[in-house]
Image: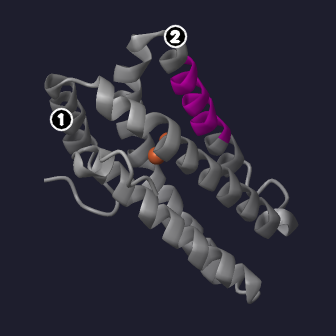
């Protein structure tokens, strides 16, 4: 996790980082469940991941990514790549049960892609974004986050 630039000191970045941590912990539990052959438990954990990921991705796309993409240049490219990764994850998740016998393998594939995506956000996006965004833009992000709520913390 990124602790070097101070981005986690700033809400709403801290909120996104907390959700990343929850996703990674659920992923780690899911790997353990699959390692012990418990696919039923793994499927429950996978549903939790999908539930957390939904509002998380909407917050990122309506909030931080929508703000940073307007900076253009390298920021636009980094942002577009992250949005493509969201689409790729969504596609993988939607096709998980195409071949039920391959579910466990597909689940590991999703977890690997999710880990890589979270790393890209924590290391490429958040440190740059926290230096770029104005107070008003951070407030905008916070409003979007409140609208979308969170599967780990209900919207107030
Ligand atoms: Fe994301
Ligand atoms: Fe994220």
Answer above or below: position of 19 versus 59: below
Q: Residue at x 48, y 19 (%)?
A: 75
Q: Residue at x 59, y 74 (%)?
A: 28
Quickly name the residue at label 2. 73
Stretch in magenta:
77-88
Work out how far the residue at label 2 is from the one at label 1, CA to CA, in angstroms: 26 Å
Q: Which tag, 2 or 1, sits closer to the chain's start?
A: 2
Could you tell me which secondary element the residue under label 2 belongs to?
helix
Q: Residue at x 43, y 52 (%)?
A: 2
Q: How far across and how far down the image is residue 64, in percent? A: 35, 31
Could you tell me which secondary element the residue under label 1 belongs to?
helix
- State left or right for residue 124 relative to residue 84: left
Image colouring: one colour
Q: Residue at x 47, y 46 (%)?
A: 122
- State left or right for residue 8 relative to residue 108: left
Does the magenta run of residues contain 130?
no
* Mark 2 or 1: the one toward you: 2
């Amino acid at each position: 996790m990124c602790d070097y630039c101070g981005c986690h000191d700033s809400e709403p970045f801290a909120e996104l980082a907390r959700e990343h941590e929850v996703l990674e912990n659920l992923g780690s539990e899911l790997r353990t469940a699959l390692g012990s052959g418990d696919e039923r438990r793994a499927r429950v954990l996978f549903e939790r991941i999908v539930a957390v990921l939904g509002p998380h991705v909407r917050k990122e796309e309506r909030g931080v990514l929508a703000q940073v993409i307007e900076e253009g240049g390298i920021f636009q490219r980094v942002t577009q790549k992250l949005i493509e990764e969201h689409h790729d994850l969504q596609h993988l998740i939607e096709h998980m049960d195409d071949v039920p016998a391959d579910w466990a393998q597909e689940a590991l594939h999703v977890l690997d892609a999710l880990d890589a995506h979270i790393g890209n956000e924590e290391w490429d996006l958040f440190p740059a974004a926290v230096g770029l965004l104005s107070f008003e833009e951070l407030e905008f992000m916070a409003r979007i986050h409140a609208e979308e709520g969170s599967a780990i913390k209900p919207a107030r």
